[in-house]
Amino acid sequence: MSLSSLPRVLSSGVKFLLNGREKSFVVNRVEARELARGRFAEALREAFPGASDNEVARLAAPVLGRSERQIQNWLSGMSSPVIEDVYTVCAILGVWKTMEILTSDRTRNDILGQIGQR
Protein backbone atom coordinates (compact mmCIF):
# COMPACT_ATOMS: atom_id res chain seq x y z
CA MET A 1 0.00 0.00 0.00
CA SER A 2 1.37 3.38 -0.98
CA LEU A 3 1.19 6.41 1.23
CA SER A 4 -1.00 8.18 -1.33
CA SER A 5 -3.68 5.47 -1.05
CA LEU A 6 -3.85 5.70 2.76
CA PRO A 7 -6.72 8.25 2.90
CA ARG A 8 -8.86 6.11 0.58
CA VAL A 9 -8.13 2.96 2.58
CA LEU A 10 -8.89 4.70 5.87
CA SER A 11 -12.10 6.16 4.45
CA SER A 12 -13.31 2.78 3.24
CA GLY A 13 -12.41 1.26 6.62
CA VAL A 14 -14.42 3.89 8.47
CA LYS A 15 -17.38 3.37 6.13
CA PHE A 16 -17.14 -0.38 6.72
CA LEU A 17 -17.05 0.08 10.51
CA LEU A 18 -19.98 2.48 10.39
CA ASN A 19 -21.81 0.05 8.10
CA GLY A 20 -22.82 2.76 5.67
CA ARG A 21 -23.78 5.30 8.34
CA GLU A 22 -22.61 8.86 8.10
CA LYS A 23 -19.70 9.84 10.33
CA SER A 24 -21.89 12.61 11.71
CA PHE A 25 -24.14 10.17 13.60
CA VAL A 26 -25.58 12.01 16.60
CA VAL A 27 -26.91 10.09 19.54
CA ASN A 28 -30.30 10.77 21.09
CA ARG A 29 -29.12 11.01 24.70
CA VAL A 30 -32.56 10.32 26.22
CA GLU A 31 -33.07 7.14 24.18
CA ALA A 32 -29.50 5.98 24.86
CA ARG A 33 -29.83 6.64 28.60
CA GLU A 34 -33.13 4.76 28.87
CA LEU A 35 -31.79 1.83 26.85
CA ALA A 36 -28.55 1.68 28.86
CA ARG A 37 -30.34 1.87 32.20
CA GLY A 38 -32.76 -0.87 31.23
CA ARG A 39 -30.02 -3.16 30.01
CA PHE A 40 -27.91 -2.53 33.12
CA ALA A 41 -30.87 -3.39 35.35
CA GLU A 42 -31.27 -6.62 33.39
CA ALA A 43 -27.56 -7.35 33.83
CA LEU A 44 -27.81 -6.75 37.59
CA ARG A 45 -30.73 -9.13 37.89
CA GLU A 46 -28.78 -11.76 35.95
CA ALA A 47 -25.56 -11.29 37.95
CA PHE A 48 -27.33 -11.27 41.32
CA PRO A 49 -30.44 -13.45 40.93
CA GLY A 50 -33.05 -12.79 43.56
CA ALA A 51 -36.77 -13.19 44.04
CA SER A 52 -37.28 -9.42 44.06
CA ASP A 53 -35.41 -6.21 43.30
CA ASN A 54 -34.90 -5.75 47.05
CA GLU A 55 -33.14 -9.10 47.22
CA VAL A 56 -31.05 -8.28 44.13
CA ALA A 57 -30.01 -5.03 45.84
CA ARG A 58 -29.20 -6.86 49.08
CA LEU A 59 -27.00 -9.36 47.22
CA ALA A 60 -25.27 -6.79 44.99
CA ALA A 61 -24.60 -4.06 47.56
CA PRO A 62 -21.65 -5.68 49.37
CA VAL A 63 -20.06 -6.88 46.13
CA LEU A 64 -20.28 -3.48 44.40
CA GLY A 65 -19.63 -1.42 47.53
CA ARG A 66 -22.84 0.56 47.00
CA SER A 67 -25.91 1.06 49.14
CA GLU A 68 -28.98 -1.09 48.59
CA ARG A 69 -30.88 2.13 47.84
CA GLN A 70 -28.43 3.06 45.09
CA ILE A 71 -28.83 -0.34 43.48
CA GLN A 72 -32.61 -0.11 43.76
CA ASN A 73 -32.36 3.22 41.91
CA TRP A 74 -30.41 1.48 39.13
CA LEU A 75 -32.94 -1.35 38.97
CA SER A 76 -35.83 1.11 38.67
CA GLY A 77 -34.03 3.20 36.03
CA MET A 78 -33.93 6.29 38.25
CA SER A 79 -30.15 6.70 38.00
CA SER A 80 -27.16 5.43 36.07
CA PRO A 81 -24.12 3.61 37.40
CA VAL A 82 -20.56 4.80 36.89
CA ILE A 83 -18.46 2.88 34.39
CA GLU A 84 -16.61 0.99 37.14
CA ASP A 85 -19.89 -0.55 38.31
CA VAL A 86 -20.86 -1.45 34.75
CA TYR A 87 -17.45 -3.05 34.24
CA THR A 88 -17.73 -5.07 37.46
CA VAL A 89 -21.19 -6.43 36.64
CA CYS A 90 -20.07 -7.27 33.10
CA ALA A 91 -17.01 -9.07 34.47
CA ILE A 92 -19.26 -11.12 36.77
CA LEU A 93 -21.51 -12.06 33.86
CA GLY A 94 -18.77 -12.75 31.33
CA VAL A 95 -18.54 -11.43 27.81
CA TRP A 96 -21.07 -13.75 26.15
CA LYS A 97 -23.86 -13.15 28.66
CA THR A 98 -23.10 -9.41 28.69
CA MET A 99 -23.38 -9.19 24.91
CA GLU A 100 -26.58 -11.22 24.94
CA ILE A 101 -28.13 -8.76 27.40
CA LEU A 102 -26.81 -5.66 25.62
CA THR A 103 -28.01 -6.69 22.18
CA SER A 104 -31.18 -8.64 23.09
CA ASP A 105 -31.07 -10.35 19.68
CA ARG A 106 -31.09 -6.98 17.92
CA THR A 107 -28.71 -5.97 15.19
CA ARG A 108 -26.21 -3.16 15.47
CA ASN A 109 -28.28 -1.10 13.04
CA ASP A 110 -31.45 -1.69 15.09
CA ILE A 111 -29.74 -0.34 18.20
CA LEU A 112 -28.15 2.61 16.39
CA GLY A 113 -31.53 3.38 14.88
CA GLN A 114 -33.08 3.46 18.33
CA ILE A 115 -30.50 5.75 19.91
CA GLY A 116 -29.84 7.99 16.90
CA GLN A 117 -31.25 11.47 16.46
CA ARG A 118 -34.44 11.40 14.43
Image (cartoon, rainbow, N blue to C red):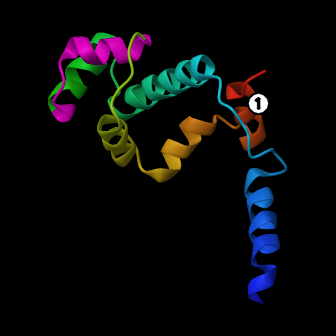
Q: Is residue 18 left or right of residue 90?
A: right
Residue 30 within the magenta-colored segment of the rendering: no
Residue 7: % across, % down: 77, 72
For the residue labelled by badge 1, is the local secondary structure a helix, a strand or a loop? helix
Part of the protein shown in magenta? 63-77
In the picture, the quarter occupied by the C terminus is top right
Say which quarter of the image contains residue 74: top left
Q: Is residue 10 left or right of residue 95?
A: right
**Residue neighbourhood size for the residue with mark 1, other residues' Cα within 10 Å, grouped as few (<14), some (14–19), many (≥20):** few
Residue 27: % across, % down: 65, 29
The front one of 89 and 16 is: 16
Q: Is residue 1 visible?
A: no
The secondary structure making up most of the magenta span is: helix
Residue 70 within the magenta-colored segment of the rendering: yes
Residue 60: % across, % down: 24, 27
Residue beneath the point at 40% across and 25% down: 45
Residue beneath the point at 32% across and 30% down: 48
Residue 69: % across, % down: 23, 11
Q: Is residue 112 visible?
A: yes
Residue beneath the point at 57% across and 23% down: 35
| 90 in relation to 13, above or below | above
